[in-house]
């Protein structure tokens, strides 16, 4: 919109559009390698100690020999979309357009495929930069039904993943998420209700309410992402495609009596799967 080729000077163009000149002259810079390495360590520590806030993470990093200030740790946590998981006092009211739904899964027996789905979004480190990964998980069978990569913490990739899962597998009875802004947005809530799905949300800071997705993230990162420092988004997509194929069809789960998610989801016995 603003161009140096226009007869009006850039200063006047900014005045007419009510834009600061700094936004015009600013050129984005890549994230330094040292910062990316620090973000990866924070991600690992957050998986191990989800209750740790910026102060504890700072101290845990110092035990590893990494000296960093609490404010810098807090800044990187905001950038990564992670926060200490504990029950916060409810001192603010949600935005009118961002409705929060009650948790519907407490004391409910969940044994059938497509009875309950869970969704979440996590930070994904790469060799040069990072992405965000969103996944749709079948609660009873632990099967990953759909996933998407994104470079921003927006609602778009969550909607794409949900629509892909619905198109491939139909609608669940209940969809459970956390209270992240992507899932409380008007567009996402409208999509869920349009398909006639009951919406359930974790309690404030109650990470155990969505424990199966947290376990999925730990498996994905320690068994795939941390072992292969992706150079490009294409390489990340290939690696995750390969891993989720293995996770669904070849990785036995102790919670499923040694069966794979595909076996439980499709009702196959081990001998049928081998055939």
Image (tube, rainbow, N blue to C red):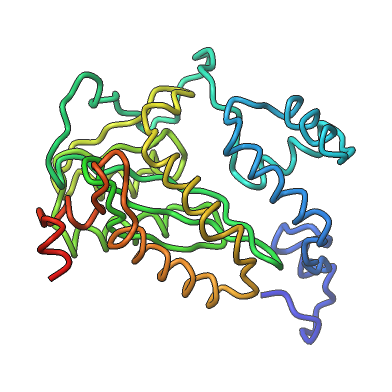
Q: Quadrant of residue 15?
A: bottom right
Give the residue displayed 45% in from the left and 30% down from the top.
Answer: 95
Residue 141: percent from left, percent from top: 22, 46
- In the drawing, does residue 198 fall left or right of residue 130? left
Residue 8: percent from left, percent from top: 80, 78
- In the drawing, does residue 187 fall left or right of residue 57? left
Q: Quadrant of the C terminus?
A: bottom left
Residue 98: percent from left, percent from top: 39, 35
The front one of 89 and 49 is 49
Q: Quadrant of the N terminus?
A: bottom right
The front one of 12 and 109 is 109
Give the residue displayed 79% in from the left and 87% down from the top.
Answer: 5
The front one of 59 and 233 is 59
- In the drawing, does residue 75 fall left or right of residue 143? right
Q: Quadrant of residue 36?
A: bottom right
The front one of 53 and 198 is 53
Residue 225: percent from left, percent from top: 56, 60
Give the residue displayed 39% in from the left and 30% down from the top.
Answer: 96
- In the drawing, does residue 132 fall left or right of residue 182? right
Give the residue displayed 18% in from the left and 36% down from the top.
Answer: 198
């Amino acid at each position: 919109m603003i161009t140096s080729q226009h007869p009006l000077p850039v200063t006047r163009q900014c005045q007419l559009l009510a834009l600061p000149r700094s936004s015009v002259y600013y050129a984005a810079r890549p994230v330094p390698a040292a910062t990316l390495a620090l973000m990866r360590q924070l991600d690992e520590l957050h998986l191990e100690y989800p209750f740790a806030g910026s102060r504890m993470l700072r101290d845990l990093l110092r035990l590893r020999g990494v000296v960093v200030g609490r404010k810098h740790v807090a800044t990187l946590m905001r950038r990564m979309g992670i926060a200490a998981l504990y029950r916060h006092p409810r001192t603010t009211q949600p935005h009118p357009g961002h409705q929060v739904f009650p948790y519907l899964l407490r004391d409910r027996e969940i044994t059938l495929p497509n009875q309950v789905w869970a969704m979440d979004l996590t930070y994904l480190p790469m060799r040069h930069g990072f992405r965000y990964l969103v996944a749709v998980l079948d609660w009873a069978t632990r099967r990953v039904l759909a996933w998407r990569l994104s470079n921003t913490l927006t609602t778009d990739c969550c909607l794409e993943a949900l629509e892909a899962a619905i198109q491939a597998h139909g609608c669940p009875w209940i969809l459970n998420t956390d209270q992240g802004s992507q899932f409380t947005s008007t567009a996402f809530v409208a999509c869920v209700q349009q398909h006639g799905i009951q919406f359930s949300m974790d309690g404030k800071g109650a990470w155990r309410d969505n424990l199966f997705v947290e376990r999925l993230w730990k498996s994905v990162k320690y068994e795939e992402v941390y072992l292969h420092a992706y150079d490009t988004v294409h390489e990340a997509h290939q690696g995750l495609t390969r891993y989720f194929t293995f996770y669904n069809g070849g990785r036995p789960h102790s919670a499923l009596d040694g069966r794979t998610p595909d076996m439980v989801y499709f009702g196959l016995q081990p001998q049928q799967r081998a055939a």
